[in-house]
Amino acid sequence: MNEIVLINITGRDRKGLDSKFISILAEYDVSVLDIGQAVIHEHISLGILAEIPVKENFAALYKDVLYAGHKMDLSIEIKPVEGDQYEKWVEARGKERRIITLLGEKLTADQIARVATVIFENNLNIDNITRLSGRISIANPQAKLRASIQMIVSGKPNNVKDMRAKFMQISRETGIDISFHVENIYSGNRKLVAFDMDSTLIHAEVINELAKLAGVGEQVAAITESAMRGEIDFKESFRKRVALLKGLKVSELENLTLALPLSEGAELVCRTLKGLGYKLAILSGGFTFVGDFLKEKLGFDYVYANELDVLNGEVTGGVCGEIIDGEKKAQLLKEIADRENITLAQTIAVGDGANDLPMISCAGLGVAFHAKPIVRERAGNAISTVGLDGLLYLLGIHEREINQEMVGKS
């Protein structure tokens, strides 16, 4: 076997650095077996795993690389790699890999250390760490801070359930979101995102707002909360609540729609995802008159929600057609995926309530957004500390890509 060496170059970054050292390797007909580079605050760490075809050239190459490093005031380390070590490294390429994303308004050393400790305790190795959020100014901080890093870890966890539980504990105690899912061929190839509407896309439960207009706010709110906690069948609770809305005028529905507040980050996440070619769907146990409004405002491709029965300009207290509950949402997600000629593994589902769990569970990536405890526990991926645009970081989209997409749409 030819000579294999690991070259590590560290120090202050500058233009032409990579060109200089790789050109030296080229002079000796070196094959590059692996290469990686990171730059933090204008300081570079460049690693090259190289195969030297003629062993006798090692000394000359070593000398040339060290001399170039000395002239550029860089630290150089060159270590021979034994053939059996290299082959073990090659054989390890089939290991399971998982993506762990940390997301919050800021990230501290304590938060990252606690996550890294759980990774170590589960016999996993951190292969890569990437910052997804933009650079943060200390002198002039942004109004809405975002801090996110993505870790790629390899190996088989000792106990996945226990690992998730510890991540949830860290999340509760330190105020960050921790997403944890297996990396596969679909991780970077999602095509469809399905959102719940009430308390996900909009910062309100529409049926509660309608109930206030009808003077039955407290009665409906109590039933809604019970349904969202999974304590009562959704269809049963829905019929009970809608019946209390009898007599509301259509004009009141229209006025309410215009006043509904969007969730923080909703416009940004929808515009960015549409710009990147995703299909967007609303799968809601809410109402079509709100869903249709959001379809036009945010560019959704599909809207499925419940239609209030109206007669002579007033709500009758009934519903037209089949009620959309949790199971129906999951069924609709599958139907849309089929229509788009994609697999469920290429879908994403985002919601907050118990009736979102079926679609969250069957989607390729399920995300609980500012969700009830039962949903957070079962979803595996959660956004609780920032707005809906936090989804973009969970998808591995860097902030500069988000900004570039928004500039292109302006």
Image (cartoon, rainbow, N blue to C red):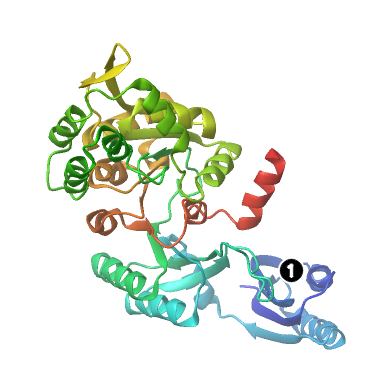
Label 1 crowd (10 A; few <14 / some 14-19 / many >=20): many
Q: Quadrant of the N terminus?
A: bottom right
Picture residue at 48% right of the left edge, 55% below the top: 390
Residue at (20, 40) in percent of width and height: 220
Give residue 282's quadrant in the image: top left
Relative to 122, does residue 200 appear above or below in the rendering?
above
Residue 365: image location, x then y, percent: 38, 48
Q: Is residue 164 above or below residue 394?
A: below
Residue extending farthest to the front is 215
Report which residue position mark 1 lands on: 30
Examine the rendered structure and indicate whether residue 63 appears above or below residue 217.
Answer: below
Q: Residue at x 20, y 45 (%)?
A: 218
- What amino acid type should be assigned to the residue bearing mark 1? Val
Front in this rendered view, residue 109 or 351? 351
Position of 360 with respect to 191 (left or right) is left
Viewer can see residue 12: yes
The image shows residue 401 at horizontal and vertical percentages of 64, 51
Q: The residue tagged with tag 1: helix, strand or loop?
A: loop
Q: Position of residue 72 (x, y in %)?
A: 85, 83
